[in-house]
Amino acid sequence: MHTNAKPDSGWTELQHVLMSAMCEALGGVEFDPAWYDDVVTPMDLARGLARRDEFVRARILQQVVLAALVLNPTPPEVMARIGRVATALGVGEHFLGDVEKYGPESY
């Protein structure tokens, strides 16, 4: 799911630390970036979460956004993928404004 926040150049060290902490704290699993070599498409993610309610889908999108917030600047390809994820999950694209407003390039 978080592969949509990975820049084309690969995971940054900060993203790796953040993803490791989130996976351990929220799922009790160890994060290995190699697991995410292939991008999970927004439609694949939406199909996998189809039986989940809007709250869960929004939380997943928030995790993707959080992983993108540490990029400086946030690459256009990441913003585009997050927009497609938001649309596919049906939770709105208002989270994209958070990336633009609170991302590192905003201060």
Image (spheres, rainbow, N blue to C red):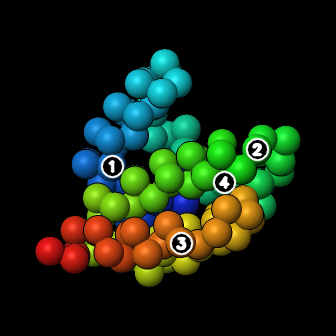
- Identify residue for label 2: 53
Task: Give the residue furthest to the left.
Answer: 107
Q: Which of pointers 4 and 3 lies earlier in the amino acid sequence?
A: 4
- Identify residue for label 1: 15
Question: Are the two marked residues, 1 and 4, in contact with CB atoms closer than 8 angstroms?
Answer: no
**Relative depth, front residue between 45 and 100:** 100
- Mark pair 1, 2: CA separation: 27 Å
Residue that appears at 40% across and 53% down: 67
**Percent x, y for residue 70?**
29, 58
| Label 4: how many Cα within 10 Å (few below 14, some 14–19, many 20+) | some
Residue that appears at 33% across and 49% down: 15
Amino acid marked by disc 1:
Gln
Q: Is residue 56 above or below residue 80?
A: above
- Mark pair 1, 4: CA separation: 17 Å
Q: In this view, does 25 lie above or below 15?
A: above
Amino acid marked by disc 3:
His
Q: Quadrant of residue 87?
A: bottom right
- Identify residue for label 4: 40
- Mark pair 4, 2: CA separation: 20 Å
**Percent x, y for residue 97?**
43, 75
SS at mark 1 in the image: helix
Q: In this view, does 31 lie above or below 29?
A: below
| Label 3: how many Cα within 10 Å (few below 14, some 14–19, many 20+) | few
